[in-house]
Every structure is written in structure tokens, then in C-alpha cells.
């Protein structure tokens, strides 16, 4: 059965079940494995586990979020966008009993879902390593990942495709990004990344020596894993040949071209362990060996990576699904069931061990179906609680309320574009005008989160805030103000539109009163509205996903 | 009418008219008091970062094989390049370390190593650059100016210390902080005061640390707009004679800005001067670089000394490595030179010696950890101190380093 999950053997069974694709019961959908599974039942199991622990700790959970809070949260979490002005009030005002479940299904079926999770994973997989990857623009890689997510591919299939890529496909970006310098992917770097992201463990500590923090894994274990990537290299674009990731031998050198030394891949599934103290020396040679497992029979010249991917994604490997689930939980709840997300080794203790186990099992049995688990989590009461605190749950860490996350980086810029309704102005370079807006583009300036950072970490400093306050918002708000006031609506209506557009809710009576007084006092309405929009876009609530 | 019954709007009007104490809002109220305490209690550091790797044998460690002549300096028996005539007269304030031996000769990795003291990727964490460490160790978190400013180009960030200690980057020292000045400051203050009231309200409901950080960030940005100390970013206000001494180059302006910032209390300023990656016409381009830094570097040291700031300011001159001595064309990290100045160190001396070709260290080799330990000691930072990141401890400087005792 395990084998039938492997890529290549899977589509036949999927095709057989394709008639099931329409949703049967709300929250029930065909999973990547091709069988319908009930996400609502999983949601109820989540709540049993969460509520039991809260009860034991005598913590009273915060009540359910209202519809406006839920709507903004689910849009940001599943699509990285705000609800649009023409939809936002309709959801708040509608009365259907299952409207939340329907919205979750609608967003999971939208193309923005795949794009959002592709953005999340691309940032982790193509690390923004200032020296090596600063100029890498993995647009195609993100497009490929987005399609995989939108098509409902199993996580095991996606990771297998990523790790076994041969040729020129966009999945090859992963290997090209995991290099130290030049173009050759570094087996050590790949294994470190695979350990962190797909196994949730700190293997790289054993890269240079046996390490006290991860005494379970030895120096040779690390390099035994690295050996599976020893033949993988990048053959750059030359003449008519396209650049590609491959394990095959390099083509014979072109006698007419001046070529640098060509990498000769090692044979026999072995790797030399470099001496950490002297780059010119090696310590010894080790064979390719699975972590805590056997050394498989490998053919002389590979490919080795399919063996690795099979081992990694097999149900018998306890780490793979657990790491994915823990990370997925953290996407929604700002922290994992085990933290840090990439340090889930044998000594780590989960806050809700049974919950982690049951979600891991569900994930495996659904064919590692991301959408299914997302649907389950988002339909739970735990996910749908308000982020507002009760008198005694401010510091609770058992999910008695929704933690506040921050809208940052690219998502924040996209939300700004969505509100302002215009593309940001092209940043002029210094040669073209004497007074440039800035030398640094928005994308660079706001890309301040560091690799795999806690989503509730606030990363902006004076340069970003000054740009928002004094340049971006004032310079770009004219168009949207004109658009929302062209029907001569009364000021109260206009302020309400601004709230719906930016904060996805209506203003309270007090807020409305105060802002209307502000508008009135400003003299000209356009100036007053500009101030209101400025306040909303610079507010803590705008950058809060709460 | 009691204060409690004032609407925010009314309170704003009254405070703008000067009726209520505390200025427009609490944001600006406490700044006035703080500005009075002008004494800087901590040491400061200016890193003159020579990006690309200056050739030691064409600057501070001239050899027989060098393309340039050596000239005498104010230190008996010590010679430097003929293109460093002004620095030759400032060597009393300098310790020239001719025995640097670090081993990393790839730009990116060497830049990382010399900024953090650690090899890139070691231990699976991102290490903070020196500026972030100094910012965390010596900076005041309530200080109205940034604690780490990088001038003239981007630098390495705060790594595991987090964005609080990341640099404020000034791309063009002639222009200062971007978006700091606006036409209608009073109008902004009104909006900002209402924004603050709204944010406080949300914070009461959500009690979330990130929202507090957002609010604090805006307070600091608005404070910076109001701060009299932000004038430190305006180098144009310097007298002509001072501007002339530093010169009109971007590096010269950066050095002047660094002095102004240190004077205003900023603990770490990095001034980046690129253009040292001189392959091909190696010696000609090294000559341009060396001539370009001579006047600004010398002016900075003289100026700091005149103002009584040199004893409390460590000035570091370095790149990521040196260059081969033939004509300065190739990267070389086995033997090279850095310069330390001020901070009460025993300056006016040369420490270490290379062979006749400047290719091996004959005497007194200095490793990366020795160098970093020395910097920490000069600034009063405990190099052995540990930070915890994701549950694992990291020392400011890795084990095995010894401060250069000749300097203390």
C-alpha cells in the first residue's frame, strides 16, 4: 500500500475516483489519495484535544470571532489578500448557517490559495541568502509550486518531484539555490535544508562533528544522507544545451569552447567527508545511508535521489508527515505544536501530543493532502476563536484565543496595492531624476523578515515606516479616494467604505464619530479623507492578522 | 469639563494650543527631557569597511615588490604608501595590525566572516554582524536615533539578534534619512495623534506584543522626525572648513556623517567604501582607492581627537582580506593588514610582520577570533557572553580567541 503512494503509480487510482470531486457534504471532499474524507470530523477531533487541555489547565477560552474578524483572517491565511470591497459586506451581512465552511471551500478552490502557499514555501526552499541567492528570482519555481498546490497534489508527491528533478524544469531551482558558491549544489546544504524543512530536525549540527545538541545523529549519519546528493549537479547553459539539474555524467567537453574544469560526479553512492578544519583535506568516505536506517543498494552512477525520496516520504518514516503538520499548524496559529519548527528531534515535547499524532495520521491516510488538513484546521472552533483576550488568558499558550500574526513583506505590499488600487510607481533611478523616491525598491525595503521567522515578530524599523507614512500612502491614495467618493456619498458612508476596504469591517459608532469630526475640521473633504485613509493604512490593525 | 470627558479631538485642539501639558501627545513629551542628557556614556565604534579587499602591500604594509614607493611617517621607522601622506601624519592614533591571517578568500564568505566572526552556515544559524552586537550591547533601546547606522551601502544584518538591532541604511550620505521631512509637519502630528489613540484602543483589546511593537515603531519614526538630534544626519550644516577636510567624495561625506552620528550618541556606524575588487588593472585601481581614503580617514581621526571623542571611539579600517603583492590583483587572506584607532588603545605602533613579499606572517599572527575578541575588549563588551537563539546558546565571539595584549 505504501508503494502505491509513490509518484508515477498514483494517477490511475486518482482517475478512478475523479467523479467524487464535487463536494458531497460541506467539509467533505476527495483527498489526494482519491477517497472522500470528512474534514469536519477532523475539526471536531482537533477541538476535543484543544478543549481537554484547556479544561485541565482551567483556562476559559475566548469566544468565537465575529464574521468580520473571521473573514479577514481566513482571506489573509488562505490567500494572502484582503476581501474585496464588493464582497466584504455581503459576507458579514449574510445569514447562512454554514457560510464560514463555504467561504473556506471557496478560498481553497481559488488560484490565490496555491499562490499563497507557494510564496510561503518558496521563501523557505529558496533561502534569501544575501550572498548566493540575492539575484535569484524564482518566478517559475513559485508558479510550479502554486499549480501543484492548486491541483491538490499530495505533499509527498510535491516533495518527491522537488528532490528527484532531472533536467530543466522549474523544480530545479531548489538545487540551484542550495549552493555555496559557483553553480554546484552542495550536498551538505541540501541535507541541512531537507532535515530542517521535511524532517523537522537539526541534522546540520552534525555536519562538522558529532554534536552535543543532537547526540542522536553522528557526523557519519549526516554525510551518509549527503551521499544521496553527491552526483547531483548543475550543467549550465552552453550553446544549444539548456542548463539542467542532473545526476548523469557531464557531456564530453566541447573542444571549440574555452571551458572551465567540469565536475566529475562520484560513483558508487559514496561521499568523501571534508575535513572541517582544512578545506583541502577529507577525513574518510561513507556510503549513502538513510538516517537511522539501512544503506540501500545503489547503482554505480545513480540516480540516487529517487531512493532518498521514497525513504523520506514513506509512511514508515515518522518524521516527514509530523514536520509538515507541525509547520502547517504554525501557519495558522503562529506557533507549532512543537517549537522550534525545525527542531522536533526525539527530545522535543509537543504541547498536544495526541493532536499531533492524530493529524499526522490523518495527513498520511489522506495521501498527504494539504487542502484536507487546512480545511479541517480552519473549520475548528480553535481556529475560529476571537483574538481578543479574556481577563485571564492573555498569556495562555494552549490556543484559548487566536494569536495575532503580522501581515508583512510581500503580502503587506500586495494588500496595499489592493487597497490603493494602483500599481506602485516605478522607482526612478538616480540618473533619471534629481529627486528619487528611493534607491531601494519597496520589495527590497519591506523584505525584512529573516529566514523562517516567527510570524508574530515585528520586523519594521524607521525606514519602512517613514516610507509608508510619508511617501507611499500620501502619494498613492488619490485614486482610491476619488473612486470611493465620486458618487457624492455622504461622509459617513465614505468612512464606512474606507473601513471595509482596509480593515474588512464597519467602523464602530465612536470611530465613525471621531473620524467624521476630523474630516469636517479639515475643510476640504479630499484632505480629510486622505487623513482618514492614512490613519487606517498606518494603523496596527491594518498590519494585524488577528 | 474634566479631562476624562474630553473627546480626543478636543484634547488635540487644546494641546495644540498649548493648554494641556505634554505637547501634542505622549509621543513627543518625553523627548524634550531626554535631549537634555547629552552625555554619551558608552563607547562608540566606526567601521570603515573597504569592500572588495584592499591590498595590504599597496597601503599599510609596503614591500619591495610593491608598485608604489614607501614614505616615512610620524612614527620612527614605520613607512606606508606614498599615496597615504595625510594618514602618515596620523599614525600616532593608529595601531597597524600586519599579521592578519584569516584564510577565507571568497568575497561573500570573507565579508560574512569579518563582520560576524563566524563562518557562514556554521551551526545552522545566522550570526549578527558587529554593528548589531554593539547595538544590542551598548545601545539604549529608547534612544531616539538608530543604534546602528550603515552609510554608503548595505551591510550584514542582525541575524539571530533580530530586527530590533538591524541597521538603518543611508545609501547617500549627502541626502541623509529618506522620507524624514515633509511639507506639513503639523498636519502629520494631528493624524499621528489620532492614529496613536486608535492603536492604543486596539492594543487594549488584543494585548498582543507585535501590535505594541508596531506602535512603538511609529512612535520612534515620528520622534525621529521631530528630534533635534536627527540634525546629525544633515552634514551640510558643517562649516566649510570641516567639509573641505573630509572632501567631497562619498566616502568623505560618509566619514563626516559618522563623526556627527557618534557625537550625537549613535554607538555603531559602518561606512562602506566599495571598489577594492581590483582585478586586471590591480595596482592602478588600488592606487585610486588608497588616494581616495587618505584625506577622509585622516580628517576623521583628527576631528574625533579635537572634539575629545577619540578616546571613547574605536575606528576600525578593514576589508574582507588583503591581496597578493605582485600587483594587488588576487584575493589573499593568509597575511594581510587592518588598522585600529582610538578607544584608549595603545596606538602609535605596528603589531605583526609579514615576509619580504607580504605573503606569510612572520611574526604575531592574528586570527579572526583574536581580532573580534580585541574589538570587544576595546569597546567594553564581554566576548564570552552567550545569547540564546531557538534554544541554543551562541557566544558573541567563538572560543579560542585572545585579545591582542600589546594594545591594552
Image: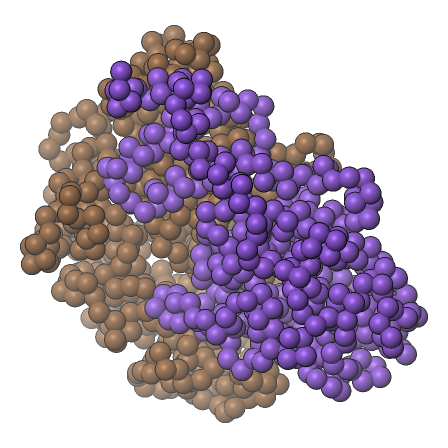
Task: Please identify which colour was used for chain A in the image.
Answer: brown
The front one of A245 and A92 is: A92
Question: Viewer-proximal residue, A264 or A274?
Answer: A274
A445 relative to B217 in the view: left or right: right
Which of the two residues, B69 or A327, is positioned nearer the viewer here? Answer: B69
In this rendering, the count of numbered labels is 0
Q: Residue at x 18, y 38 (%)?
A: A65
Image position of A277 with respect to A400: above or below: below
What x and y, as percent, mark residue B305? 73, 57
Q: Quadrant of residue A94?
A: top left
Task: Kindly indicate the quadrant of the structure image that contains residue B21.
Answer: top left
Residue A6 visible? The answer is: no
Q: Is residue A21 left or right of residue B267?
A: left
Q: Residue B377: where, in percent of width, then height?
A: 57, 71
Colour chain B appears in:
purple
Name which quarter of the figure residue B8 lies in. top left
Location of residue A494 in the rendering, given as x and y in whole percent from the top left corner = 35, 16
Is B337 placed left or right of A498 in the picture?
A: right
In the image, residue B258 sits, relative to residue B287, either above or below, namely: above
Q: Is residue B233 above or below residue A183?
A: above
Residue found at x 13% / y 64%: A354
Amino acid at each position: 500500500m505504501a508503494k502505491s503512494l509513490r509518484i508515477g503509480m498514483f494517477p490511475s487510482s486518482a482517475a478512478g475516483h475523479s467523479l467524487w470531486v464535487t463536494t458531497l457534504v460541506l467539509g467533505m471532499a476527495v483527498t489526494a489519495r482519491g477517497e472522500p474524507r470528512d474534514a469536519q470530523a477532523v475539526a471536531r477531533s482537533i477541538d476535543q484535544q484543544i478543549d481537554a487541555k484547556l479544561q485541565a489547565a482551567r483556562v476559559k477560552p475566548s469566544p468565537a470571532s465575529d464574521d468580520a474578524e473571521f473573514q479577514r483572517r481566513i482571506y489573509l491565511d488562505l490567500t494572502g489578500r484582503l476581501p474585496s470591497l464588493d464582497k466584504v459586506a455581503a459576507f458579514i451581512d449574510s445569514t447562512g448557517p454554514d457560510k464560514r465552511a463555504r467561504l473556506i471551500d471557496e478560498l481553497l478552490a481559488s488560484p490565490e490559495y496555491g499562490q499563497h502557499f507557494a510564496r510561503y514555501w518558496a521563501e523557505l526552499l529558496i533561502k534569501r541568502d544575501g550572498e548566493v541567492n540575492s539575484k535569484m528570482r524564482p518566478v517559475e519555481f513559485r508558479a510550479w509550486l502554486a499549480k501543484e498546490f492548486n491541483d491538490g497534489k499530495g505533499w509527498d508527491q510535491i516533495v518527491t518531484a522537488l528532490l528527484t528533478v532531472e533536467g530543466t524544469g522549474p523544480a530545479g531551482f531548489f538545487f540551484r539555490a542550495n549552493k555555496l558558491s559557483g553553480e554546484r549544489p552542495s550536498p551538505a546544504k541540501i541535507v541541512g535544508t531537507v532535515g530542517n524543512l521535511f524532517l523537522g530536525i537539526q541534522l546540520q549540527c552534525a555536519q562538522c562533528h558529532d554534536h552535543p545538541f543532537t547526540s542522536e545523529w553522528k557526523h557519519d549519519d549526516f554525510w551518509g544522507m549527503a551521499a544521496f546528493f553527491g552526483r547531483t549537479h548543475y550543467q549550465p547553459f552552453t550553446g544549444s544545451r539548456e542548463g539542467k539539474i542532473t545526476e548523469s555524467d557531464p557531456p564530453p567537453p566541447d573542444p571549440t569552447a574555452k571551458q572551465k574544469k567540469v565536475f566529475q560526479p562520484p560513483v558508487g553512492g559514496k561521499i568523501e567527508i571534508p575535513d572541517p578544519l582544512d578545506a583541502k583535506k577529507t577525513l574518510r568516505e561513507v556510503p549513502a545511508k538513510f538516517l537511522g536506517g539501512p544503506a540501500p543498494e545503489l547503482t554505480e552512477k545513480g540516480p540516487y535521489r529517487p531512493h532518498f525520496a521514497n525513504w523520506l516520504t514513506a509512511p514508515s518514516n515518522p518524521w516527514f508527515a509530523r514536520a509538515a503538520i507541525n509547520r502547517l499548524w504554525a501557519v495558522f496559529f503562529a506557533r507549532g505544536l512543537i517549537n522550534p519548527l525545525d527542531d522536533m528531534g526525539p527530545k522535543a515535547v509537543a504541547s498536544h501530543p495526541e493532536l499531533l499524532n492524530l493529524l499526522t495520521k490523518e495527513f498520511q491516510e489522506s495521501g498527504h493532502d494539504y487542502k484536507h488538513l487546512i480545511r479541517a484546521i480552519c473549520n475548528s472552533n480553535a481556529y475560529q476563536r476571537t483574538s481578543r483576550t479574556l481577563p485571564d488568558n492573555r498569556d495562555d499558550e494552549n490556543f484559548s484565543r487566536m494569536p495575532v500574526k503580522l501581515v508583512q513583506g510581500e503580502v503587506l505590499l500586495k494588500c496595499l496595492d489592493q487597497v490603493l488600487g494602483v500599481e506602485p510607481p516605478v522607482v526612478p533611478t538616480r540618473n533619471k531624476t534629481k529627486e528619487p523616491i528611493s534607491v531601494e525598491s519597496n520589495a527590497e525595503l519591506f523584505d525584512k523578515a529573516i529566514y523562517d521567522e516567527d510570524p508574530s515578530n515585528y520586523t519594521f524599523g524607521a525606514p519602512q515606516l517613514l516610507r509608508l507614512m510619508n511617501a507611499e500612502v500620501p502619494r498613492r491614495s488619490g485614486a482610491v479616494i476619488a473612486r470611493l467618493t465620486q458618487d457624492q456619498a455622504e461622509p459617513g458612508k465614505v468612512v464606512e467604505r474606507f473601513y471595509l476596504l482596509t480593515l474588512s469591517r464597519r467602523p464602530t459608532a465612536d470611530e465613525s464619530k471621531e473620524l467624521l469630526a476630523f474630516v469636517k475640521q479639515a475643510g476640504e473633504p479630499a484632505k480629510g479623507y486622505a487623513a482618514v485613509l492614512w490613519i487606517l493604512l498606518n494603523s496596527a490593525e491594518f498590519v494585524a492578522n488577528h | 469639563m474634566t479631562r476624562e470627558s474630553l473627546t480626543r479631538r478636543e484634547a488635540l485642539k487644546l494641546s495644540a494650543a498649548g493648554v494641556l501639558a505634554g505637547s501634542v501627545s505622549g509621543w513627543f513629551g518625553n523627548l524634550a527631557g531626554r535631549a537634555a542628557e547629552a552625555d554619551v556614556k558608552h563607547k562608540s565604534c566606526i567601521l570603515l569597511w573597504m569592500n572588495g579587499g584592499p591590498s595590504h602591500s599597496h597601503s599599510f604594509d609596503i614591500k619591495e615588490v610593491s608598485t608604489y614607493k614607501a614614505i616615512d611617517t610620524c612614527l620612527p621607522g614605520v613607512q606606508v604608501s606614498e599615496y597615504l601622506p595625510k594618514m602618515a601624519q596620523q599614525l600616532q592614533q593608529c595601531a597597524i595590525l600586519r599579521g592578519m591571517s584569516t584564510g577565507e578568500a571568497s568575497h561573500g564568505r570573507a565579508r560574512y566572516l569579518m563582520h560576524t566572526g563566524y563562518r557562514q552556515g556554521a551551526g545552522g544559524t545566522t550570526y549578527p554582524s558587529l554593528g548589531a552586537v554593539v547595538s544590542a550591547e551598548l545601545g539604549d533601546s529608547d534612544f531616539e536615533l538608530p543604534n546602528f547606522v550603515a552609510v554608503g551601502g548595505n551591510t550584514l544584518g542582525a541575524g539571530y539578534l533580530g530586527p530590533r538591532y538591524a541597521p538603518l541604511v543611508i545609501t547617500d550620505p549627502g541626502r541623509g534619512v529618506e522620507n524624514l521631512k515633509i511639507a506639513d509637519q503639523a498636519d502629520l502630528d494631528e493624524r499621528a495623534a489620532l492614529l496613536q489613540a486608535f492603536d492604543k484602543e486596539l492594543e487594549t483589546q488584543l494585548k498582543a506584543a507585535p501590535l505594541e511593537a508596531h506602535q512603538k515603531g511609529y512612535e520612534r519614526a515620528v520622534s525621529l522626525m521631530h528630534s533635534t538630534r536627527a540634525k546629525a544626519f544633515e552634514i551640510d550644516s558643517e562649516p566649510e572648513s570641516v567639509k573641505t577636510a573630509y572632501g567631497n567624495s562619498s566616502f568623505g561625506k560618509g566619514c563626516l556623517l559618522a563623526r556627527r552620528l557618534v557625537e550625537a550618541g549613535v554607538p555603531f556606524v559602518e561606512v562602506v567604501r566599495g571598489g577594492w575588487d581590483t582585478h586586471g588593472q590591480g595596482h592602478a585601481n588600488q592606487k585610486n582607492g588608497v588616494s581616495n581614503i587618505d584625506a577622509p580617514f585622516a580628517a576623521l581621526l583628527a576631528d574625533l581627537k579635537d572634539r575629545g571623542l577619540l578616546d571613547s571611539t574605536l575606528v576600525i579600517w578593514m576589508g574582507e582580506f588583503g591581496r597578493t603583492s605582485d600587483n594587488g590583483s588576487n584575493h589573499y587572506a593568509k597575511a594581510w593588514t587592518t588598522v585600529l584607532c582610538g578607544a584608549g588603545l595603545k596606538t602609535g605602533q605596528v603589531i605583526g610582520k609579514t615576509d619580504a613579499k607580504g605573503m606569510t606572517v612572520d611574526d604575531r599572527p592574528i586570527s579572526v577570533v583574536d581580532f573580534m575578541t580585541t574589538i570587544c575588549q576595546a569597546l567594553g563588551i564581554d566576548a564570552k557572553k552567550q545569547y540564546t537563539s531557538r534554544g541554543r546558546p551562541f557566544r558573541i565571539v567563538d572560543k579560542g580567541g585572545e585579545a591582542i595584549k600589546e594594545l591594552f
